[in-house]
Amino acid sequence: MIKLVARGQASVKWGYLSPVLAVFLTLIAGTFLFWGLGKDPVLALYTFFISPIADWYGITELLVVAIPILLCAYGLALCYRASIWNIGAEGQLLLGAVVSSTMALQFVDSTSLWAMPLALIAGMVGGMICSGISAFLNLRLNCNETLVTIMMNYIALNTLLWAVYGPLKDPNGYNFPESALFGDSTLLPILFEGTRLHVGLLLVLLALVVVWVFMSKTFLGFQIKVLGLDKPAARMAGYKETKLAVMVFLVGGALAGLAGAVLVTGTTGQLIPAISPGYGYSAIIVAFLGRLHPLGITLAGLLIALIFMGGEMSQMVLNLPRSITGILQGLILFFLLSCDVLIRYRVVFTLPRFLSTATQGDK
Amino acid sequence: MNNVKRLAMLGITKEYPGCKANDDVFLNIEHGEIHALLGENGAGKSTLMKMLYGVVKPDAGTIVWNGKEVSISEPAVARGLGIGMVFQHFSLFETLTVTENIALVLGAEAGNPKTLAARIKKTSERYGMPLDPERRISSLSTGERQRVEIVRCLLLDLQLLILDEPTSVLTPQEVDDLFKTLKQLTKEGCSVLFISHKLHEVTELCDSATILRAGKVTGHCNPKDETSESIARMMVGDDIAISNECRRAVGGEVFVDIANLSTPALSQFDIALKSINLQVKKGEIVGIAGIAGNGQDELFKALSGEEIHRHSKAIKFAGDFVDHLSPLARRRLGMAFVPEDRLGRGAVPELDLRDNALLTSFDSDLVKHGFLNKANITALADHIIEKYKVKTAGNHDAAESLSGGNLQKFIVGREVEQEPLFLLMSHPTWGVDIGAQVAIHQAILELRDRGCAILIVSEDLDELYKVCDRLGALCDGELSDFLEPEALPLVKLGQWMAGDFDTASTNVESKQGVLTHD
């Protein structure tokens, strides 16, 4: 028999080990999945997890995919530390992309130095508008933040579709639902010749450091932690709950909006309907897999980016459907939540009842 | 030895990781006696009780019940033997009636609800604890709820009743009633195991006592031959102070001035405050007695700012209205507070003592330009741990890993060290052992002598009589008059706690029947 016994104190060790175990279990489940689909599991795993990053270009591509995911995930981690269950990074990213594109399209023929920074700032504003609406609904009107942020995702998605089919559609684009190509002054500079890796990477590193310092070294970060762990204690201590909550909503929105801006100005160079294959949703998994810690998130973000790339690779090489990406991401979250039981509980293996009473009787 | 004991626990040992909760404990209970189990927090009383009631299994030792060795593997077995237990925190469903609650526990034995109701009525009246079986728990007072728990045990063929701190939630009159019931029970041969921190109750009620310290039995005695002091000494050992010298103070100018404070009840289970008038002067301690759930929470939150009543003008600090101010603004005016719940409000369970020191002391040079000064935070935590003798492995311990009393010392220390002008405390020593109680009272008294206005809301009358300079009671959201403890007989305070305020001849009566409390 397997029994769960409560630990006196949450285990720090399992806090770190649980994500590792979850990834390991996902790999095992993935093996069975590939085998069940009639593929050689070893070849499939290689195609999925090794081949995408077998060369330098692959690694830079991995970083390109990881950039928007990480930006979203850092912001979400702040929200989750405050126990604000913001599921709306996807919508904030999309709206950020729309607003950023609107700004970028003002500079198509300009060489202004302001073009790129303004496009990025516009993206952040777009994300903040989206999360700000959620914050208002949640904090002022007492609506559940999870539902509100999810619904905002659909509103943002349809805003994006409206924009590319309407006001932002390229007049010379043969009626394709895409914006015009941005001018060079708006595009993010490429870091390494011959790759697509842009300065968005530097923004990610900056966000990593700032969020890390903010969380661990500042009083505001401390207040957010207390608010998330123990609301009555935060109130007793006199922390301003609403202000703190608004702040994390807005910072989360700004970072997700920045992710959207980086996508349009760095990766695609124009606004397209399929700007994000669900980066904002994956960021939720990344935030939890990374234990809401900036460093952990960075590692988790690279892993999830790899799964995105592996999904495409196995589509091309193995002829597998792309939904395998979603399945593996779901499996990781599933195993992570299961493994997290070990943080508060110990597993004890005991003999089945009839055996243990029998042995007692022998004494 | 011809007499068979009701219960003998022989050489009971139970070890938890990192601590030996019970070490070779012997406990004997005779037929029809009231046996006291005494000890400080963490002495191992609850562990011993849990083993007796089948919640926890002992590592070693035997339990002999009526002369036969038994293995109590789960509470159902204990109940089958005739062991009943009333826990400190009641396990009743508020929305169900008395009969329904009792039927839930009795299971198949409950039988037809009608006959059960009749049995409840008969049993409760027989033992002097009348109960209406049809009432919902939510409409019962705490004392009545306790009766439900006791009657629930009595309906079984009860031979041993275990009571864990039963009097901490009762008015003095209710305590008297409970004692009468217990005495009647013992006359019929039932034994009672009585756990309490209130030693004068033990000396009054109990026939014998076993004293535990750090998991070991340190003495047996007949409480009737002992004094509260001598028993306390056995509980804490030789090197810890067990009393404070308490001088009364008169106080100076008024710091907190509450005039006509009325608040609505926010929900069904909340209490509305009804035109509260109260003044607390600098350099005095004012105490408010009362059974929990009579508006203490509401009063506390109205003062602390956790519930803000924006449009009222009733509370003044140092002459200025503060009704509209946030808890932070009130803290910055010099207020500090120690809430009733240590874990979850007074301290964040998961965070360590450094972070919990920072929690409310952020204005004590711990934050510079928004950044945390970790060295100062650690220093403050260590200072509180050392000065208030908080027993802990170090400042990196999580708050939840400390015992209740030690955490309370830490929280009180944290608030006192901020040198507040007004300290608001709720149940400052609830469930805290004697050594820690003395330390906490000492800190409060010294703070008062430095000119702080202190308001204590507590259910513990011994404590209130000991430290307060003026004392009153809160009942159903209404506040009584305030008198010096020496001028307020316990009987009258009891009446106040029960809501009987109109005893106009206050001064005449109080001259007689003055009650001295240790």
Image (spheres, helix red, strand yellow):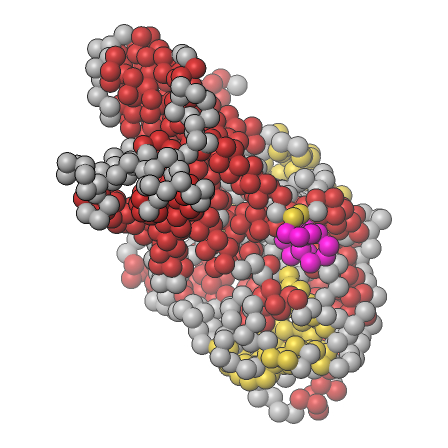
Where does residue B164 sit, x and y in percent of width and height?
A: 58, 53
In which quadrant is the N terminus of chain B drawn?
top right
Is residue B125 left or right of B208 when viewed as pictured? Answer: left
Task: Residue at 44% x, 45% y: name it.
Answer: A114
Query: Which of the two residues, B450 or B71, is positioned nearer the viewer here?
Result: B450
Where does residue B80 sit, x and y in percent of width and height?
A: 44, 43
Where does residue A9 sit, x and y in percent of width and height?
A: 57, 37
Is residue B96 left or right of A323 when viewed as pictured? Answer: right
What's drawn in magenta, residue-wise? B356-370
Residue A132 located within the stretch drawn in magenta? no
Query: Which of the two residues, A331 or A265, is positioned nearer the viewer here?
Result: A265
Query: Which of the two residues, A352 or B409, is positioned nearer the viewer here?
Result: B409
The correct choice, above or below, for B54 with respect to B437 in the image is: above
Q: Quadrant of residue B24?
A: top right
Q: Quadrant of residue A194?
A: top left
For residue A102, say whether it is visible.
Answer: yes
Task: Residue at 52% x, 52% y: name it.
Answer: A227
In which quadrant is the C terminus of chain B drawn?
bottom right
The correct choice, above or below, for A128 with respect to B24 in the image is: below
Is residue A117 left or right of B420 when viewed as pictured? Answer: left
Residue B368 located within the stretch drawn in magenta? yes
Task: Residue at 60% x, 79% y: name it.
Answer: B321
For residue B119, say whether it is visible.
Answer: no
Q: Residue furthest left?
A: A175
The correct choice, above or below, for A104 with respect to A353 in the image is: below
